[in-house]
Amino acid sequence: MEVLRSISEIKEKVNEWKSNGLSVGFVPTMGYLHAGHKSLIEKASSENDRVVVSVFVNPKQFDNENDLETYPSNLQGDKALIAGAGGDIIFAPTAAEMYPDGFATLVDIEGLDKELCGATRPGHFRGVCTVVTKLFLIVTPDRAYFGEKDFQQLAIIKRFTKDLNIPVEIIGCPIVREEDGLAMSSRNAKLSEEERRKALIIIEALNIIKEMVYQGTSDVEELKKEASRKISTMDIAKIDYFEIVDPDTLEKIDVVKEKALAATAVFIGKTRLIDNMIIGE
């Protein structure tokens, strides 16, 4: 599995493919890949002639220096997973390659970043928009693949791609879960055995309110109160947010009329995990 470090190298490779009439799929990641990433790469491989996977821990989207410094990495393991899933090239630039001295341009978005993760992590989505825009311009893929676990991120990327007329088709892919229901995440590796077991309180809370809606409860405050109560029964769980929003606008709602998005971020010990579920379908 070839790993390219420079922007010029990856642009040259992609231009070579495109000159031969080949389509290019792209899966941006921050590394430490798992089965969820594998599913994205496999889908990209099934729909494109060539697949680029980026591995870059983007410093501009972290609001906590310790979180950045302790983010897990395993490039050798990533290479094996990418090769097995049908990826063709890894683009793994350094921060200096992506943000050289004098870098002064940021990409921001209004509206979609105000709730959920955006409300508690100021500047996070500015960093996401900036790096994804750069990656799209560098790789120039036909299609790019993102997991629905980061539902807000996916909505924002779809929005700015449309607004800026970037010729990339954005494809969202379903959340991949462990057998016991925990959403797969690179951050799961930071959990102790006890924390890993107790993290299941997140999916349990989501399932409870999904069933409540199915049984006829539609009041959002009642649903949020029950979800928060459930999560708070776990001693090491601290809720960052638990919201129920319109899945298209990400705006808060008072009543679940049709489908809605229940989304949460919870600290299990020191590790922040996110998850979401469509309810009311």
Image: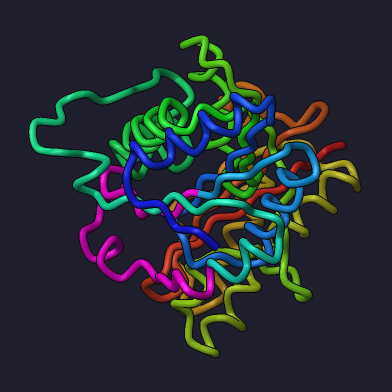
| Residue 223 visible to an observer of this rendering | yes
Q: Residue furthest bottom?
A: 193
The residue sitting at 24% across, 56% down in the picture is: 64
Going 27% across and 40% down the picture, which residue do you hit?
A: 98
15 to the left or right of 197: left
The furthest residue to the left: 102
Whether residue 246 can be seen here: no
Give the number of callouts. Answer: 0
Q: Residue at x 72, y 59 (%)?
A: 176
Q: Quadrant of the N terminus?
A: bottom right
Q: Is residue 167 above or below residue 66?
A: above
Spot the residue most to the right. Answer: 215
For this view, does 228 lie left or right of residue 213? Answer: left
Q: State the residue in front, 198 or 153.
A: 153
**Front residue of 71 and 29:** 29
> Which x, y percent locates residue 273?
50, 62
In the picture, measured across the screen, residue 88 lies left or right of residue 166, that is: right
Q: Which residues are magenta?
A: 54-78
Is 58 a magenta residue?
yes
Question: Which part of the image, by quadrant, shows the C terminus?
Answer: top right
Residue at image point 55% right, 77% down: 234
Q: Please tell me which residue lies in front, 192 or 144.
A: 144
The foreground one among 130 and 102 is 102
Q: Position of residue 213 (x, y in %)?
A: 83, 44
Quadrant of residue 167 within the rendered picture: top right
User: With respect to residue 69, does 235 lie above or below?
Assistant: below
- In screen coordinates, is 29 left or right of 172? left
The x and y percentages for residue 112 are 48, 24
Task: Report the coloring of the rendering.
Answer: rainbow
Query: Where is residue 6 drawn, in percent x and y?
Result: 32, 45
